[in-house]
Structure formats: structure tokens, C-alpha cells
Amino acid sequence: MLQDFAASAVIRALNHLAERESWARATLKPFAGRSAQLEAPPFLLVLGIDAEGRFAPAGGAPDVTVSIDPLQVPAALLDPKAMMRNVRLSGDAEFAQALSQVLQRLRPEPEDELARFVGDAAAVRIVGLLRGALAQAREGGQRLAASTVDYFVTENPMLVARGEVERFTQTIHQLRDAVERLEKRLQQLEARR
């Protein structure tokens, strides 16, 4: 039941986005009656295409299966193309291509949606503030990760810096080359005896 509710919500959201984009419906219309199964464990969603090129609930065997790396799902909230980076497709390649194109290009317009409730100017400001907050959170996370790595490399050396590993590897290679030269030299000296 929860799976059906989630599928219904996703279908409504996708159709809402596709309503404004006639190209999306035109792209999917030739594939009416086909269905696609989207897998991002633990989630499973089956989407059908109706005669108008809209998304609809579907049953039965899917014509195409799209397996998405579940680690890419959170990134897709900020960048829809991120989800399609590590994808496995099986089934009807032409349908999969069209579906992928539509899903990657459908973009929510939060300003338009919010403007209906608070007006255009307020919607632009609110969305701008939210985008700024997300950018600051992302930047803060990157700084925290860099500080953590720096701590574990320099202050409490539990990890080794990349430069140190490269220098160590280079020293090992130089030592190996020197040992090989020494062995050749010893072989030459023994051959002279």
C-alpha cells in the first residue's frame, strides 16, 4: 500500500512537471502502452505511458528496467542529472532513451509553484534564500570534510597524506632500481674473476 501511494505521488509530480512541457509529452506519446520499472533499492517504481504521453500507473512485465545507484538519489534532489550517472538499463533501448531524456530535462520551477501562494517577488526571494542556504550547507560540509582529513593526517596521524604516499612509493622505486644496478655490477665483477 505504501509502495502504491509513493508511486501515485511520483506519477502526479511527473505529470505536473510534464503538463508545462509539451515536448515531454510529444517525446513519450509514441511509447503509449509501454511501461518502465525504476529501481533504486529499496524503492521500486513502475511507470506506464498513456495515449497522451503522460505517466500512468502500470502493471505486468516492464518493457524497460532502469536500475539506479541508490547513493545517487540524494544528489538528484540538487541535480536531476546526477541520478542518471550510474544507471543500468535493460529492455527496449529506444524507450529507455526517450524516458531518460524526459526525466533528465524535466525541471521543477519552484518559483512558479510558490508564486501562486505568495506572489512572484516573494517566491523569487524565498527560493533564492533556500538555494543560498543549500549552497552554504554544501560548502560547510566540504570544509568540515577537509578539516577532518587534515586532522587525521597532520594532528593525529591515523592517515597518510597522498603526497607522503607518492614520495614513499618513489623512494621504493629508486631503491629497487639501485638494488638492480648493484646486482648487475656484482654479476659483472664475478664474471671478471
Image: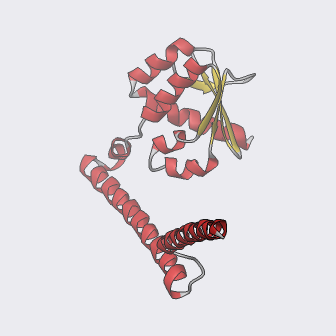
* Quadrant including the N terminus: top right
Q: Nearer the viewer, residue 23 or 3?
A: 23
The answer to whether one can see residue 181 in this image is yes
- Compared to residue 94, the image places residue 174 above or below, namely below
Q: Which residue is found at the position 42% from the left and 72% from the top?
A: 143
Residue at far left of view: 121
> x and y percent of residue 162 in the render?
50, 70
In the visual, does 21 lie left or right of 31? left
* Residue at point 38%, 45% (across, down): 110
**In this rendering, position of residue 156 left or right of residue 37:** left
Q: How many numbered dots are placed on residues in this image?
A: 0
Left or right: residue 7 compared with residue 85? right
Depicted 80 relative to depicted 135: above or below: above
How are the colours assigned in the image? secondary structure
Quadrant hosting residue 60 = top right
Residue 127 in the image: state x and y as whole percent.
34, 53
Whether residue 51 appears in this view of the structure is no
**What residue appears at the point 47 percent right and 28 percent down from the top-left corner?**
102
Depth order, front residue of 83/20: 83
* Residue at the extreme front: 193
The quarter in which the C terminus is drawn is bottom right
Residue drawn at point x = 58 percent, y = 37 percent: 10
Q: Position of residue 113 (x, y in %)?
A: 38, 42
Q: Residue 144, image x and y in percent?
A: 47, 74
Q: What is the residue that sits farthest to the bottom in this orientation?
A: 155
Give whichever of 119, 137 is nearer the camera: 137
